[in-house]
Structures are given as C-alpha cells and as structure tokens.
Image: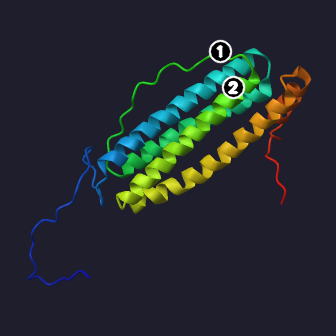
C-alpha cells in the first residue's frame, strides 16, 4: 500500500530497463531471448518457403494450392511479427537475421506437402523448447505468451498432416490432385472429425 506520509524517503525508484531502454518488470533469461530471436527467424524462413511454394503451384495452374500457400506465407509473417511485438513489450531489441533464399523447385505436390509438414513440426519443436526454457527460468510471462502459439501450431500440424495424407492417397494422379486443389480453392480443406 502506498503511503502519502511526507516523512517517507524521496529516493528515486529504480526501474530495470532492457537493451532498447524500455522499462521491464522482469529481465529475460539470455538463453530464452536467443531462442525467441531464432524462432522469429524460423517464422520468417517459413514465410519465404511458403511463398516460394505458392509460386510453384501458381506456375502449374493449381490456384487452390497456390492460394493456400500464399495465405500460409502471410500467416508465418504475422507469427514473426507477434514474436517481435513480444520482444519489444519485454524491453528487448529485435535482431533480424539474414534468411537464405528458399528452395524453389520440387518434383511433386507430395514432396511439397511432406516438406511443409516437416517445417511445421520443426516450428512446434522450437515452441516446445522455448516453453521448457521459460518454465526453467520461472518466466510465466513467456509461457502465457507461448500458450496460444502452441495451440495454433498443433492445429497447423493437423492441417498439414491431413493435406499430406490426401495428396499421398491421390498417388500423384492429376484428376485427384485437381479435386484437392478445388477443395483448397473453395476453402473446404477441413480435417476429418469424428465427433
């Protein structure tokens, strides 16, 4: 409880600040900070990869796949922005690392879907590692921040597993792939639900 007693000390209040000079309530563990910076880079790499995949599909007149991957590229860029916003809110400087040009050539739709699923699994693993680091560091703020990201990531893995399964079932048959492309174009690519 604050007192208005005039006899209290008038010593200045010390406020911790982060590298950017912003006030911080809780300093961030260095290992966790490095992991968040790396995760931001991973999200930017995923965005570039998905945009390259969207182009590959567009070049083959598969507009449903192209639209789906363009949206995924935008989503990954938003995820990177979310991590950057969090770092700023915690008084940290955001360090943008160089990202290499993404792969731009694939042999099949299945190869793209498998690479996409693997990329989503890697992003999930990164989130899980950061969550464990935050728990070890007693950084509840970061675990709360990561909770919705983990939920979203699990849903993304499910979507990509579903699409990979459908593409594998199609066995690279053009007619079957065009049906999946049409479903993606119409936004009807929901995973199978039994309940």
Q: Is residue 165 left or right of residue 149?
A: right
Q: Residue 33: x percent and y percent?
A: 35, 45
Q: Residue 14: x percent and y percent?
A: 17, 62
Mark 2 is surrounded, within 10 Å at the Cα level, by few (under 14), some (14 to 19) or many (20 or more) other residues, namely: some
Mark 1 is surrounded, within 10 Å at the Cα level, by few (under 14), some (14 to 19) or many (20 or more) other residues, namely: few
User: Which sits earlier in the primary sequence, circle 1 or circle 2?
Assistant: 1
Write the residue at 66% across / 35% down: 117
Callout 2 secondary element: helix
Q: Residue 31: x percent and y percent?
A: 33, 46
| 172 is higher (above) or lower (below) than 146 | above
Q: Residue 32: x percent and y percent?
A: 36, 48
Q: Nearer the viewer, residue 177 or 14?
A: 177
Write the residue at 82% across / 53% down: 193
Q: Nearer the viewer, residue 76 or 195?
A: 195
Write the residue at 50% across / 53% down: 146
Give the numbered dot on residue 105: 1
Q: Quadrant of the N terminus?
A: bottom left
Q: Is residue 23 left or right of residue 61?
A: left
Write the residue at 60% across / 47% down: 153
Q: Is residue 170 left or right of residue 144?
A: right
Residue 161, by quadrant, is: top right
Q: Quadrant of the C terminus?
A: bottom right
Give the numbered dot on residue 60: none
The residue that disc 2 covers is 112
């Amino acid at each position: 409880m604050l007192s208005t007693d005039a006899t209290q000390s008038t010593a200045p209040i010390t406020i911790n600040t982060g590298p950017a000079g912003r006030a911080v309530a809780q300093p961030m563990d260095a290992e966790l900070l490095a992991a968040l910076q790396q995760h931001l880079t991973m999200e930017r790499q995923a965005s570039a990869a998905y945009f390259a995949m969207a182009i590959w599909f567009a070049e083959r007149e598969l507009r449903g796949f192209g639209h789906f991957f363009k949206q995924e590229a935008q989503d990954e860029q938003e995820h990177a922005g979310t991590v950057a916003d969090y770092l700023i809110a915690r008084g940290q400087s955001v360090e943008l690392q160089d990202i290499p040009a993404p792969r731009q050539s694939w042999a099949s739709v299945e190869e793209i879907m498998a690479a996409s699923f693997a990329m989503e699994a890697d992003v999930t693993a990164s989130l899980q590692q950061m969550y464990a680091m935050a728990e070890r560091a007693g950084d509840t703020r970061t675990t709360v921040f990561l909770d919705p990201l983990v939920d979203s990531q699990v849903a993304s893995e499910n979507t990509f597993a579903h699409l990979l399964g459908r593409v594998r079932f199609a066995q690279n048959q053009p007619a079957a792939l065009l049906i999946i492309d049409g479903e993606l174009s119409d936004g009807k690519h929901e995973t199978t639900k039994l309940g």
